[in-house]
Image (cartoon, coloured by chain):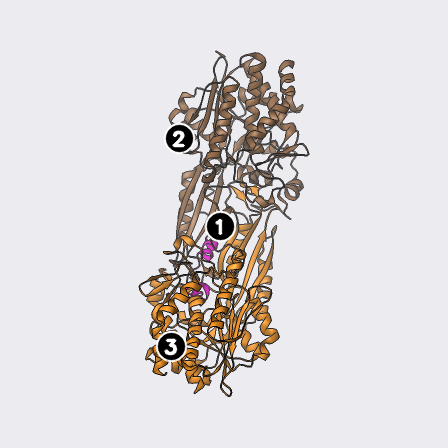
Chain colours: A orange, B brown
Amino acid sequence: MEAALLDYYRAHREQHLEGLFELLRIPSVSALPAHRDDVRRAAEYLAADLTKMGMDGVRLIEGDGHPIVYGESLHAPGKPTLVLYGHYDVQPPDPLDEWLSPPFEPTVRDANVYARGAVDDKGQTYLILKAVEGLKAVRGELPINVKFLIEGEEETDGGVLSAWLAEHGSELGADAALICDTEMFAPGLPTITTGLRGMVYAEIEVHGSRTDLHSGMYGGVAPNAFQGLAQILCGLKGPDGRVLIPGFYDDVREPSAAELEAWAELPFDEDQLRDHEIGSSRLVGEPDYPPLHRIWARPTFEIHGMPGGFIGEGAKTVIPAKATAKVSMRLVPDMDPQRIADELRSAVAVLTPEGMSSIVRVLGQAPASLTSTDSVYIEKAAEAMSQSFGRPTVYQRSGGSIPVVGLLQESAGIPSVMMGFGLPDDNLHAPNEKFHLPNFYAGIETVGRYLSLLGE
Amino acid sequence: MEAALLDYYRAHREQHLEGLFELLRIPSVSALPAHRDDVRRAAEYLAADLTKMGMDGVRLIEGDGHPIVYGESLHAPGKPTLVLYGHYDVQPPDPLDEWLSPPFEPTVRDANVYARGAVDDKGQTYLILKAVEGLKAVRGELPINVKFLIEGEEETDGGVLSAWLAEHGSELGADAALICDTEMFAPGLPTITTGLRGMVYAEIEVHGSRTDLHSGMYGGVAPNAFQGLAQILCGLKGPDGRVLIPGFYDDVREPSAAELEAWAELPFDEDQLRDHEIGSSRLVGEPDYPPLHRIWARPTFEIHGMPGGFIGEGAKTVIPAKATAKVSMRLVPDMDPQRIADELRSAVAVLTPEGMSSIVRVLGQAPASLTSTDSVYIEKAAEAMSQSFGRPTVYQRSGGSIPVVGLLQESAGIPSVMMGFGLPDDNLHAPNEKFHLPNFYAGIETVGRYLSLLGE
């Protein structure tokens, strides 16, 4: 990368950090209707930034939900066109009392910025903007063509982007998409993610009695919706971590021998994972698969919370009429989300105890994805990362889900390049989410380097 | 009962209803710290009423919690002394959206007053006050001696009354206690309750990971506290309703043959219970015992709610670090609450999955009680009820718990007389709690008649 660009990036670190802080202060929690206006404010902030840095056609793409921020620069004829993806919405911040500093007041401690969305994905979206801004400022024009697509529903159902891509995806005409929404395998180790798990998110609701009942007057004869739900949940997943839904594992594709070999060479530290990231006396899950295999290439079933009944302080002796479990299943290639959702429905129906009824509501679903490493877009990305971090880039999968990867592939045949600058202990979706500032700055330089390489 | 007293009661119905409404408007929810002042306001309201009707020594007995309202009249030498018990605290009103009229705005529909506490136990406490007020007004003096003890923690742990009785119970010097906090077996059927279940109320808290985790990054290797808790709950109670805690049934005393025979003659309507009170397609529970036996003479284990994790709208993909179940066990004679609490602790410890930890917090406990019907205080109560309702009085047990019954017996050797005016469909502890107004008025007359009979 030319010295002028590197100088520019390094001279603007303070401005870049200030701009990021401003974005992090906006509580753009897409799942909570109360934050609807905040979500829009974050979109408008990014759109204004795109306009200021000289992008064309900047606009908010509206749909039935939170808008997509769009902007493009198509002044490099004959050069590749890259979709630059990010998301400006964040997870809800609760439990609030576990944050050391408020989630929407970004705070720097030990070279990390702590805030909800710091790394997922405001920080990693904003570093793409700043990389492009620098290229434009230093060169006057970008070395390749770019189309920004920054959505506001990644943490919910992604409905607006999914609907827009279904209609307009084929007109995008891009060669690849750059997505910075993943993490490095280890601090300082440049990493490209080639596989993601998919997901089905659902609510299982069990009904016992018609109304809440006194547990003295009716305890012994009235169905208890929570007891029924507990039975269903125990019937869906065994104590060994194996999901018991009939047919669940039928379509699971095993990783290739080459992939398994590469994983075995990664500097995986089970003690670090168990003691420092998870903080449990042991790892759980299917005993026949090693931990990385379980996270990257095996499907899961998790309970996120169980609303209903009496959850206040003290003692209330009620038999709740209704109990709900919020659950999700992570999927791997080649599991079909629709088929898995159907299998969940069938399993819950079979497991529902006599005297109770149940319904399953699917809130969102997306397939898993797996990208080939045999592509110039991946190769140049690996080269840019290796240059920035001074070490060979490794390939990993991720246990998370980034629905846009599957959507871009399906709707427009656009492969994704997942360059991540997060760290394993960044507390994604948890209290005290953070982004390591040296990675934020390295991310800007790496993306600048990548776009330069693609333009050569 | 003399005509003058009956005339007095009937002439004052409007005033009695207005006074009850005033009491019902005070949201004296003892379990919720936010209502602390309201609880005290209800106590002060009753104390003022006792003073106004001419009771002596009226005061609030303070302790570590909500106060007891005390007042006495000891001007009938040689006549019996009766403790008049009631409680002025109520259950939390949630779920609020299921109430047809607001829980603290008493509303009359179809000869029922709807409000939280209407029947449990403000209405049934207030009718004792009004019965005594009438006797005093008409006769100038009461036919027997009375000591009011009206507590404000019956719906929580009853700590203040329990501590006070432990210290002062033996000085009470009463022959029996009248408690109106139960229900009639069927509309119009005068009923005295002779047995109550006891209770252990506890929270089971399970810890998995140290902090909430991203279900993509860690799903497959991190323990899920809710899954662990579901397993524990399934291990504590089987699908057939049988509690699986080792030793749980060891001390259960079977009802006598005479009692079982009397129960068989009660006009029990299983369809009414199942379809109209519970509203489920079938009754659940231990198949070897008939429904009344299960409710009155078998212990239970119920889940009331499961706080923790994500319970908001939409989708949040978190593996919660902590999950809690609020549970209670109803006990029957001769189960020892302390022993049952210990057995629960042991069972939970054994059932806690590897990689997780758990604790059990006991929030309250009380033994079951069983009163002999062979007593003048029960006989006169049955006579008073029969006269009021024009039918022979029946004896039942209740599945509920009224801890004071056991406390009075233990601390002072005082037997309780449980005369109830509630109806089976009064929605105790549930939305749309009600009290049938004809029973409120009949209750006043019956208590007036009972005190008159005891003074003869």
Is residue A293 left or right of B373 when viewed as pictured?
left
Look at discs 1 and 3 and give the one toward the viewer.
3
Residue lying furthest right in this view?
B110
Q: Label 1 is found on which chain of the structure?
A: B
Location of residue B48 in the rendering, given as x and y in whole percent from the top left corner: 50, 23
The dot on residue B63 is 2
**Disc 1 element:** strand
Mark 2 touches mark 1? (CB < 8 Å)? no
Q: Is B299 in front, or is B173? A: B173
Q: Is residue B223 covered in magenta?
A: yes
Same chain, labels 2 and 1: yes
> Which residue is identified by label 1?
B306
Q: How much space separates mark 1 and mark 3, taking CA atoms?
A: 47 Å
Question: Mark 3 sits on what residue?
Answer: A445
Judged from the image, the secondary structure of the residue bearing numbered disc 3 is: helix
Image quadrant in which the C terminus of chain A is located? bottom left
Magenta residues (range): B214-238
Q: Residues within 10 Å of mark 3 (few under 14, many from 20)?
A: many
Say which element carries label 2: loop
Chain under disc 3: A
